[in-house]
Image (cartoon, rainbow, N blue to C red):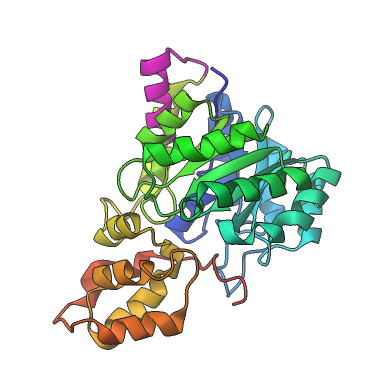
Amino acid sequence: MKTQIMDVTLRDGSYAINYQFSEHDTRRIGVALEDAGVPFVEIGHGMGLNASSYKHGLALCTDEEYLAAAMQSYKKCSYGMFCIPGVARVEDLALLKKYGATFVRVGCNIDKIKESEPFVRRAKELGLMVAANYMKSYTATETEFEACVKLSVSYGADYIYVVDSAGCMLPEDLKKYFDVIRRNGVKAGFHGHNNLGLANSNSLYAIDLGFDIIDTSLQGLGRSAGNASTELLVALMDLKYGFKEYDNRRLIQFSDEYVRPLVKNVGLYGLDIYCGIAGFHSSYMKYIHKYASKYSVNPYTLIVEYCKYDKINMDEKKLEAIAKELPKEDINISKYGFTRYIGDEQNSSL
């Protein structure tokens, strides 16, 4: 089997604990993953390089501290970081080279791929493997997606990632985008979220299609409803393909003993499900909270109605206008669990 796993527990998983992974966590979790055979490990602040701030949430450690912990501890796996243009600066990429990282993943909304060009080109100059992560991939038509792929290939990207940011994609969506990637002669990655409970099954289908890398995290830890689960997907790979290159007993035991205690929000929230139904990115949830509270409207309805207008960007004035027109309800806004949603990676101007 050519498909490999990239474990993102130490990056995407940090959303679930308010970016509070320590250097000790970075060493211990990463070493456990590489000992179990996982070839790629992503570390750092959930929003990537240069994100730790009052604007985007303060991580427990700096980018350099996370990278130094990995360099001192990891012996077999490849490690790297995420990067969002506008949050990260091009000069931040030099840290990855300095601390022995081998890859960077440049994440842009699908309608802003041109912003990735200087980051992709500089990373290639530094000798890094580069993945172009198309956030909110599902909002692009096949033609629009192909135009983006051609741009990223021209910049030098090694991988194009289909990113199911709201956990709303169906298997046929994966196939449509995968076919576009393949006919442009570049490798493919998939990053799924679990809002509709499809992250693991979609990831397994992505393996069937021939995706080169699939993102997972221990316990499915991640933003909003979380990601595909490393230990579950590895078990499925064994059951379906007899794939035994990863030590799943070790993964399951470590995950149960070390990562599961970090998971405080058990179960799926209605807001997560509605993000998946409507294609809404959870980093905008604070705006839903604000205007659902202000106008006493149902947040589920507000999410659905706003996504009829825009699934990519947040127009706060438009959201408020929609909220004003919705029927008022006598609701207990605190029951919806808004306080568990952190991160504002879609708004780099903050």
Horizontal and vertical percent position of residue 231 = 41, 30
Residue sitting at 63 percent across and 61 percent down?
112
Horizontal and vertical percent position of residue 188 = 59, 35
Q: Quadrant of residue 110?
A: bottom right
Q: Taking the image as drawn, is residue 10 in sight?
A: no
Depth check: give the residue in front, 35 or 43.
Answer: 43
Q: Residue furthest right?
A: 125
Horizontal and vertical percent position of residue 168 = 37, 50
Residue sitting at 30 percent across and 82 percent down?
323
Q: Is residue 55 left or right of residue 50?
A: left
Q: How many marks?
A: 0
Please tell me whether residue 286 is drawn above or below residue 128 in the rendered image: below
Please tell me whether residue 74 is drawn above or below residue 48 in the rendered image: above
Q: Taking the image as drawn, is residue 330 in sight?
A: yes
Magenta stretch, overall SS:
helix
Q: Residue furthest front?
A: 143
Q: Which residues are magenta?
A: 230-245
Depth check: give the residue in front, 313 or 67.
Answer: 313
Q: Is residue 234 left or right of residue 147?
A: left
